[in-house]
Image: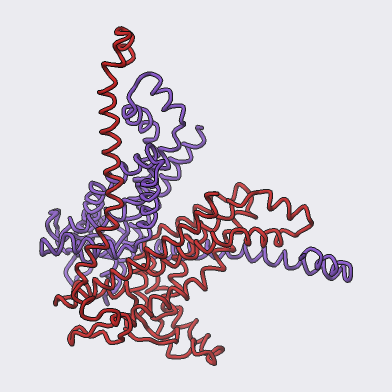
Chain colours: A purple, B red
Amino acid sequence: MERNKEMSIVNENIPYHFFRRKAINGAMLALCAVSALIAIGILSLIFFYTINRGASYLSLDFFLQMPKPVGETGGGMANAIVGTVILIGIGSAIGLPIGVMAGIYLAEHGNNKFAVLVRFMTDVLSGVPSIVAGVVAYSLVVIPTKHFSAFAGGVALAILMIPTVTRTTEEMVRLVPQSYREAGLALGIPQWKTTVQIVLRTAFRGIVTGILLAVARVAGETAPLLFTALGNRFWSTSLDQPIASLSVFVYDYAKSPFEDWNNQAWAAALVLIILISLLSLSVRIVTRNRFSSR
Amino acid sequence: MSFVVSASQTTKVPVATSPKRHFGDVAFKYTTTIFAGFVLLLVLLMGFEMYMQAKPTIEKFGWSFLTRTVWDPVQEEYGALPFVFGTLFSSLIALVIALPLSIGIAIFLSEMAPRWLEPPLSFLIELLAGIPSIVYGLWGIFVLVPWIRISLEPLLSRHLDFIPLFRGAPYGYGMLAAGLILSIMVLPIVTSISRDVLKAIPQTQREASLALGATKWESVKLILGDAKSGIFGAVLLGLGRAIGETMAVTMVIGNTPSISISLFDPGYTMASVLANEFTEATTAMYLSALIEIAFLLFGITIIINMLARLLVWSVTKK
């Protein structure tokens, strides 16, 4: 129908019509390319400012010194760096076993309605705002124990890690060719041993990739830590006490009226960005080798 | 190992090992099932836990919690409308800005870019998604907000002040800043899912339209028509992301619980009131009101994500 209408127009006025179609084609395609350029432009702006303002305040002191009291310049964020590592550690200790096991289930036994439901809810869980994970951790841990703690922060991060780990583990285990499983079973190896010793060993690098992705996702999280791990200006490695983290420091220092603190916020942001970029780059390298070897 | 044993014992093997093997398999299967069930349980637990904590205000205010405009913890008056409005308004601004850009990039990635260019470009867009919210917020405070105050808002109010959206004093902090920063933050997810949806459209569709003499753009329009529901799903996912976004928005929106149509005025969102006031909540009612906001946020994003996933699945899993 539409075709016929167009034909009649073509017959009436060929040169104008062609010119118009070509012009629209060129203009729209150019707009698409321009929008890609805009995105890259914004990305480089953010990187430029963070590197430009952060790099000059990044020194050895930043990594080794403790925060100085209000009014004194200098100092670093040693406690926050250790705190971030501890928080990620707790999150991983809780979230990884659940995520990896659930992912193995979905990949190896996931041909039923229950698995479809789990898969669906995992996707939905990955869209839950991180601050909501914080509220849940608050009501699960902070309210019963009556105080803020590193453990509560870890629980919040674990909730955020589970969906990422589950889905990537499933994808990676699924990539293992079916013939590997058949070969194992044909040798008389029980199915669970085939899964653990052959399938999981083959998918190991892929699973590590998923773990790195999950760590990258939570490394810079701030909202879920605000009222679980809270923050701490002093040295603390206790799981039972409030603990400092780089991201919460960026938040506090960015809002502060002291220029020295603002500068340190940029430095901490730079550390976070470098950490996360390294993680996603290593994921990229691991997965690329994986696919080219096939 | 078990192969060697079974070779020496010939006929007895199946009888001797199969019950044991059976047990291992069943145990392994059920262990993993329990963990998978735990993921399911977690979603339910999250909802239940927040509902229980929010019960005092749910019982006291009922649905009027959503329509009351006064938020005054001292007088024990809790109305969430300014926050709901701020959340929806800032997310809407974000989508209006991000949607055309994202679809443009997705078309560029899936239909136009040469094969060598697509992976690195996709990686850069993903990098944009990986930048923590807090870094966007920092950038927002020190780069975006001053630029909006000094350049963008005076420019808009000079030329467009006949539209109520662009009236008011140029503070910098406000809806416009929040909408702009959110648009950058939802861009990657809308782009990458739209790209996946476009790529899932069969190649024959493109070839058919090109063979009939369509220009590249006319062919793309046809593909977009096929991908409509999937792209709508991508937009919903972006909306879900924008609604829940906390730190960056909190840092630039101005944090004032008012309802105003002007983009220049400060506002407040559901997520930012949680970030700002949660540690200050001293009374049981105050805490309950805040947790009810979190519960609402949870409910809204769950529903949006369910719809979005179903739409995206309907295109990519044919």
The residue that appears at 32% across and 9% down in the rendered structure is B11
Residue pushed farthest bottom?
B162
Is B164 placed left or right of A140 in the picture? right
- Residue A22 appears in the picture as rendered: no
Determine the image quadrant of residue B171.
bottom left
List x then y, in percent, for residue A45. Answer: 47, 65
Residue pushed farthest right?
A12
In the depicted structure, whether residue A210 falls above or below residue B175: above
Residue pushed farthest front?
B15
List x then y, in percent, for residue B224. Answer: 62, 61
Q: Nearer the viewer, residue B53 or B217?
A: B53
Q: Nearer the viewer, residue B232 or A43?
A: B232
Is A161 placed left or right of B76 in the picture? right
In the depicted structure, whether residue A103 falls above or below residue A232: above
Determine the image quadrant of residue B2.
top left
Is B149 placed left or right of A275 in the picture? right
The residue that appears at 50% across and 32% down in the rendered structure is A293
In the depicted structure, whether residue B261 falls above or below residue B281: below
List x then y, in percent, for residue A225. Answer: 24, 62
- Residue B315 appears in the picture as rendered: yes
In the depicted structure, whether residue A60 falls above or below residue A282: below
The N terminus of chain B sits in image quarter? top left
Label count reads 0
Q: Nearer the viewer, residue A54 or B105?
A: B105
List x then y, in percent, for residue A125. Answer: 35, 57
